[in-house]
Every structure is written in structure tokens, then in C-alpha cells.
Amino acid sequence: MATTERLYYHNPNLLEFEANVLEAIPLGDRFGIVLDRTAFYPTSGGQPHDLGSIGGVEILDVYEDERTGAIVHVAAQPFAAGKVHGRVDAARRRDHMQQHSGQHVLSQAFVELFNWPTVSFHLGATSCTVDLPVEQVSREQASRAEELANRIVDENRNVAVCYVASENIAEAGLRKPTERAGDIRVIDIAGFDKSACGGTHVRMTGEIGPILVTRIERVKKQTRIEFFCGGRVLRYARDANRVLESISQTISASPLESAAAVKTIWDDLQRARKRIEALDSSLLDVEAAQFPVENGLAVGAFEGRGIETIKLLALKICARPGLTVLLADKSDQIRVVFARSADRSMDAAAVLKQTLERFGGRGGGKASLAQGGGLVAENAAVVVEFAKSLVTSV
Ligand SMILES: [Zn+2]
């Protein structure tokens, strides 16, 4: 397999090209070809591959064969042989150039301000991230790096591609050392950053557009910085503004005062929840105190009250002496709670076991309190009637 001349190395704005097919590669249900030259960028160095078409066939993936250095273009249909015309998707290429060049600028800003090197870079479909080898990065520190990066963009500095022989690379002043051999491709942002990189980059930093840090997240012992560049900043601002508008309309506050208003609403909600819990508990106290009892048996069938409530009710009823409590509730499924007062001898777990044998479901517990769920019956009343027959027949 022959290697491929990489047209994007020298001209990242070249999006249409003519090439000769060197080899067709069978890839299961897909088809691969190697060309003598290509403008398609293969996935590498954190940057995803280009899309587009070759000879009218849509390209789905582009990768580099590490063994041979050939670039393989992948499609769902077979390619024609001979001479082909290639076309790279311009919007995707431009977006990748903005994100990747923006990353070089932002990474160097973190080095210059805090001496934090970038340990990894990811260019995703929606967001980009760099990982820094520190456990904590404050919003203020991230903002300073963001500000410096945007200043470099504003200054519209030249971005040059040059080649340095590996024996001279130590003196080249790279941001990060490289172990590559031969002629090393270096991206040189005038007076700011030099990095060994095979990616596609803008010609002037102004083309990057704004750089925005959106998230700072600790990942293991490192910090992941999420950021957007160029067109993505505009799309993000539009989306974020739409969300902010919707929140501000719902709560009738101006967009930039929404955060404080939401905090007030949230605090009120927490207080209201606590109050409801306290009221619910008081109501259950009353219900338990007045719960009808016949021959030492407190039996209840409910709908939609939930397991936590009937369990609490059963415990509160059992605070009264001499009682056996059999409760069932039908919400999303039928659940039961069987319990007894401390001075009674009924085995709640045994009654539950027999009830589950009759109606199915699962559960368990102790002699004083057992609970189960997933019983199959017409309603909760049928289940407690059966349990009652077990208890009264003893
Ligand atoms: Zn790079």
C-alpha cells in the first residue's frame, strides 16, 4: 500500500481536488479506497475526520493506516476506479479548524498564566475539552485564560505551518515535547505558541472567532475544561439565551436576574416540602390514633398512597398495644405491609410468605414488620382479606 500525499498539510482551505485511486480496500459491508493525494483529514491528534464525497460517493469515515501511513476513505457504496474528484465538507472543516486552533491558543494561555500543560484534547461534535494536570481550576483562573486567549484572537496573529528536523526540535521551543522522528510539522502562532501538530488550522487567529470556557469539571486528579470557539459560541449563546428567556418568562424575572429569583423559589420550595412532610406526619398520627380496630386487627386497603406512607402508618398504629396491622396499597403495583405491636406474637414474615405464595410478588422482613410488592390481584382489598383469614384462623 502506498502512502498518500496530504494536501491539507499545506493548504487547509483546499476543499476540492483531483486524485488517482491507488487501491480499493474491502471492509466487510463497507468500501475503502486509498488515493495518491487527498484533502480529507483522517481522525488523529484529537481532531475528527472530514466528511464530503469522492466521485459522488458520500464519505462516512477517514482513517490513517498506522502501519503504512496510507489514508483510507470509507463509504457505504463502492468507488469508481481511475481518476476521481474529491470534495470536502466546508462547514465541518471550518468548524474543526476554529476549534483546533482555538485549543492551541487556550492551551498556551493556561501555560503562560499558570504553567499548566494540556495533557489531552478532545474535539467533539458539540463541545471540546482539554484536560489540565491539576485538581482545581477556579472560574476566575479559567476566565483569565479565556481573556488572554481572546486577546490573541483579537490581535489577528499569523498562524504558520513549518517543518523542523527532529534533531533540531529541542531548540524549536515547543509547548510540549514530541517524540516524532523525521521532519516534524509545527504550528506556529506568531510570538505565542509553537506545537507539533498534524491538524488543520486557520491562517490568522482572527478566524478562530470568540473562545468561551463553558464548564470546569474535576475528573479524577485532573481538571477538564470545556470550551467553544467561533461559530459554536454563537450557537451556544443562542441556545443558552433561549433557555434563559424561557426561565425568565416562567418566573417573571428579567433574564439576568433569573438566577437570584430561581434561588429564592428553590429555597421556598425546600421549606414548603419540609412543612408538607411535617403536616403529613401529623395527619398520619391522627389517622393512626383513630384507625378502626376489630378484635385486635387493624386492616386497611388503599389506592395511590405508596409504600412509604403505608409503612409509616403501620408503624404508628403499632405504637398502640395489642394490635396486628395488615395494610395494602395499589399504586403502580400492589404492595403490602404487615406489622404488630410489641406485645403481640403474630409472625408478620410468615403471613407475608403465605400471602406471596397466593398472589405472587416478592418481599421479606422480620416477625414484627414485613413488606412486599408486585402482588397480582384485582385490588388491595382482596389481598388484605386473604391475609386477615390467615391471621384469624390461627
Ligand atoms: Zn493540535
Image (cartoon, helix red, strand yellow):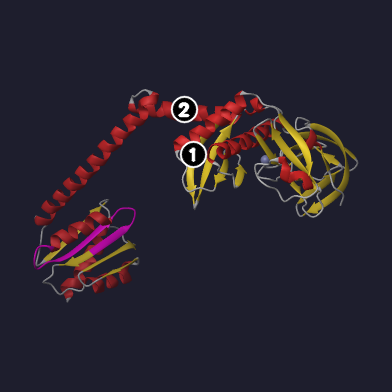
The residue lying at 76 percent from left, 55 percent from top is 28
Q: For mark 2, what is the residue?
A: 242
The answer to the question of whether label 1 and label 2 lie on touching residues, with beta carbons closer than 8 A, is no
Q: Which mark is residue 215?
A: 1
Q: Which residues fall within the magenta stretch? A: 319-337
Q: Quadrant of the C terminus?
A: bottom left
Residue 272 image-quadrant placement: top left
The residue nearer to you, when weighing 235 against 338, is 235
Mark 2 surroundings: few (<14), some (14-19) or many (≥20) residues within 10 A: few
Q: Which mark is residue 91?
A: none
Left or right relative to 296: residue 23:
right
Of the numbered discs 1 and 2, the one sitting upstream in the chain is 1
In terms of secondary structure, where does tag 2 sit? helix
The image quadrant where one finds ligand 1 is top right
What amino acid does circle 1 point to? Arg
What amino acid does circle 2 point to? Arg
Q: Position of residue 15 (x, y in %)?
A: 77, 31
**Residue 274 visible, this angle:** yes
The residue lying at 75 percent from left, 33 percent from top is 12
Residue 269 image-quadrant placement: top left
Above or below for 273 versus 386: above
Left or right relative to 264: residue 105:
right
In terms of secondary structure, where does tag 1 sit? strand
Mark 1 surroundings: few (<14), some (14-19) or many (≥20) residues within 10 A: few
Q: Position of residue 378 (x, y in %)?
A: 30, 58
